[in-house]
Amino acid sequence: MSNRTLAGAAVALAALAAVPALPFMSKYYLLLAFDALLFGAIAMSLDLLIGYTGLVSFGHAAFFGLGAYATAVCLERKIVSLWICLAAAVVVVGLYALLVSYFATARRGIYFALLTLIFAEVVYTFFRYTQTFGGSDGIQGVPAAELAPGVALDTPLKNYYLVLVFLALAWLTCRTLVGSHFGRVLVAIRENEDRARFLGYNVTRYKMGVCLVSALLTGVAGALYPGRSGFATPDLMLWTVSGEFIIMVMIGGLGTLVGPVIGGVFFVVLQEKVSSYVDWYFIVIGLVLVLIVLFMPKGLLGFRRVQGFAQWRSGQ
Amino acid sequence: MDYLVAVLLPQLLHGLVFGAALGLLALGLTVIFGLLGVMNFAHGELYMLGAYAGIVVVGVTHSFWVALIVAPLLVGVIGAVTEVATLRPLYRREPLYGLILTFGLALAFREAVRQIFGGDMRRILPPIPGSTPLLGMTYPNYRLFLLAISSVLLLAIWLFFTKTRAGIVVRAAVQDAEMLDGLGVDVPRVFTLTFAGAAALAAVAGLLLAPIFTVYPQMGVEMILLAFIVVILGGMGSITGSVVAAFIIGIAQSLLTLWMNPQRVAIAIFGIMIVVLVVRPRGLFGREGVLE
Amino acid sequence: MRAKTLVPVVLALAVIALGAAPASAQKVVKIGDLGSKVGVFEGYGKYQTMAIQMAVEELNAKGGVLGHKIEIISEDDETKPAPAVRKAEKLILQDDVKLLIGAVSSGSTLAVMDVTKKHKVIHWNSVSCAEFMRTTKFHKYYFSNQPDSRMQATGLAKYIVDKMGKKVYIFYTDYAMGQSDGRQFKTALEKLGGDVVGVAGAPLDTKDFSPWFGAINQANPDVLFVAFAGTDSLRLMTQLHSFGMTRKYKLAGIDCFLLQQDLPAIAEPMEGFVQLAHFSPYNQDKNMQAFNARFKKRFGTDANIMAGAYDAVLFWAAAAEKVGSFDADRIAEAQEGMCLDNTHIGRQCIRKEDHQVVMDMHLYQVKGGKNLPIATIAGKDSIGEPMVGKDPVEGFTWEIKKKN
């Protein structure tokens, strides 16, 4: 990772850290800012799959929702330590992601998309109909998590900084990963899977690996959600939510990491700005998605920075 | 024996009714997939548009029967325009783009309908009222009619694909579009007409099910996954497969409710689906190697 | 359409507020109307807005409350808990409402209660009937004038056992509200010697109920008790009727099963349906008739059970006037035990212990698409003991045991 990238990241981080100091930032806008960064982080982790590996997951909402439920179940039972909640989410999402990726990565293209979609729908249906977890009402009114005993994350401001730290760490993880040998193999798989296999790489293992990383980042993001909202409901993992994640990535730009973050922020802001009275924005978002696929298949910011197969070979 | 007549047969009938309607929806989906290589996420919205177009036509003409003819034609036109404007440029691209693009289309259609008609539920009264004593219970006439007309339509489509020249051209295009092009067939026109036909079929399904399920903008979202499952189970691109699979899913769903909570049945169906995708991704009747 | 109906309401109020501001320099106090404009309970939200609007217009005509003009901010929760919480946060944190009325679905209301508790905002509810609201979830700022499941069960179960039949099948909508209704009715029926021959739940927003009909027919009850609401009820009744089951069984249900406005369209399936509710435009009670006449003049349609939201505004405004402030703690204290004479059904009092309005209830039977009264049950007989903090589910030994 170059110094310039790091410097840019530091500036961006400082700017985001200063956001709550803006004069018009009410508590409510802070909650929105939380959502924007959280979904930005999710879109970024999904970009690892779509942008870098060429795998379109239509089931990321399940990782998000499972993470949220893990935390909500812990908090509901008065286990308020953030770290225990996160650990629970990592275990639950990790196990589920292993299962899904084991089966899904065995298939390519559209079959991968459909398998992730249907697995996610099983999870959604299970939570929607299981009264132990609140059925269609979900788990509601959970207390705030605690960073350390007595240090509750009970204000929008604290939660905002929490998600900012998470976003920074997630970016570092993704950036390191795509800059590594592992990341270059992923791009090679995207460009030509058979060739990568022929070169002696265990393609399936690489695909499972990146699925796991992406799922865990999304799951941890989910785990942070009940702290802000106080609930986890099955609606969080309906398949249309997975579709929205993909839209965020497509708007932001494939294979750029930062682009999807911007896509996520854009999506949340647009949705909230106009949702109170009109929802024509979804028509616009739908059509924008169509135009992007037709004319800019790498997404709005996707022209630059995609490390291609040739580059990888010359770098060997 | 009592159990058989009083419980098993009625459930079987429920399954047949639903399976037949589901078949209409899945048939179009599988032909589009076979032909264009696009898993059409917007198919559920075409189904929904059929119901809303029906409401409009019923409102104007006060006749369900006129609506049953006109609404699919309207949706067929929408389908043709959509195909030419958005899907045609994607033919030679990765199928995943089709999936994402049609997801965008679905979103736009759904919200456009919400803007025009509002988000609230609408009803269409069944054109055939009353019920008939059947199998020891009272069965609504409209559901029997639904079963009959869906079966007739499915049969007609099967005849179209096997007996008419046009149907054989479409099937040939599913197999190998390039060869057909070489034979001088206007392939893009075949594609557009097929897509329009599939859209019209979805609209028929939407309008036929409207008196039972009611009409609301989200109705497609709830059906499309089931239709996907039918298409996968039947074998993506297989016409016979999707019809058989539609009845299997319809009946399985209905019979399973006898032994488990209806809410668990959905999970069981998804479970079957995952097994099929993992073990035999080409489904029951699919050709080997289609996008595997 | 929500946008089309809401925007004029809000705009009109905004224009009135803006227009009035320079002339009288009158201050504004905002109240939040959180209802369902789309989803299973879409109709209820619409009438809740009307009822609130009527109260606000009447109060503003008399100079508002504490010299402040009241402004309504309406939001839609799509009949789902997650948007309900988000919209409640928006109303409280962004719009700074001093009173929040809603939501419609019990699931949403329970979720919103956490928000109003956290941010200390007076919260009224006039339609959700799960029993957790005035027991385990109860908090200082929460008030209700909706007869909850327990109140409805006590009155209706007796009528069912005495007049309709002893063998009862309970079919409920499987979330907070229906579970609560199912549970309370089962207990009440069995206590009175009724025989519950079967229980089944269908998820919220079920499209086809026919898979459950086989089990109901097998159990062969005298009475089919249905705990559903909104578009679910509409579909259920149509389908029951088409399967000939409305003629085969006697039907009874909860107060919010269908609004009066929905009945004429499905008058035939609903013929003879019995329910317990606090209001009907066909009740000859003079207070109800007077209220209904005003409502009809203003909106061109009959009032229905959502009229409770009208009282909610009146109680809050009266309490604010009494303490001379919009401070939530002081208003909450003033509302405890408060009585008002001019509510939509005449004099009503708020019980101090669990903030429940003591309401007289009426048994209604649907005839020709109209809810006609057949008996009255005094509020004190149906309200039951206060159970704040106690688990209303404790002691129930059957499947609808969801905790909250």
Image (cartoon, rainbow, N blue to C red):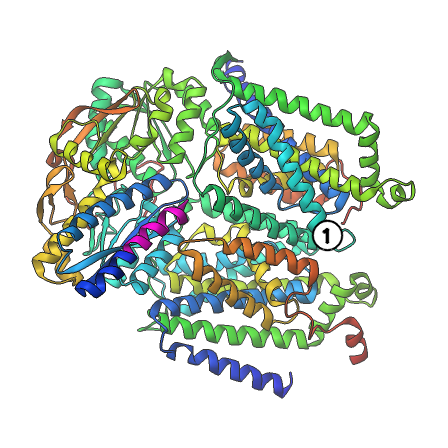
Residue A71 position within the rendered picture, expressed as x and y whole percent measured from the top left: 42, 61
Question: Label 1 neighbourhood size at 10 Å, few (<14), some (14-19), many (20+)?
Answer: some
Q: Main secondary structure of the magenta part?
A: helix
Q: Residue at x 52, y 66 (%)?
A: A266
Indicate whether C52 appears above or below B255.
below
Quadrant the N terminus of chain C occupies: top left
Which quarter of the figure has residue B67? top right
Residue C183 position within the rendered picture, expressed as x and y whole percent measured from the top left: 29, 36
Q: Indicate left or right for C220 with C334 as reference.
A: right
Whether residue C10 is in magenta: the answer is yes
Q: Residue at x 21, y 23 (%)?
A: C159
Q: Residue at x 62, y 27 (%)?
A: B69
Pinpoint the chain carrying mark 1: B
Q: Indicate left or right for A200 with C91 as reference.
A: right
Residue reaching furthest to the front: C23
Indicate whether B161 appears above or below A260.
above
Which quarter of the figure has residue C104? top left
Which residue has dot 1 on it? B95
| Residue nearest the observer in this picture, A95 or A63 | A63
Residue C307 position within the rendered picture, expressed as x and y whole percent measured from the top left: 22, 40
| Residue nearest the observer in this picture, B78 or A173 | B78
Which quarter of the figure has residue C146? top left
Whether residue C139 is in magenta: the answer is no
Q: Amino acid at mark 1?
A: Pro
| Residue nearest the observer in this picture, A140 or C288 | C288
Region rendered in magenta: C1-14
Helix, strand or loop under label 1: helix
The answer to whether residue C72 shows anywhere in this view is yes
The answer to whether residue A147 shows anywhere in this view is no
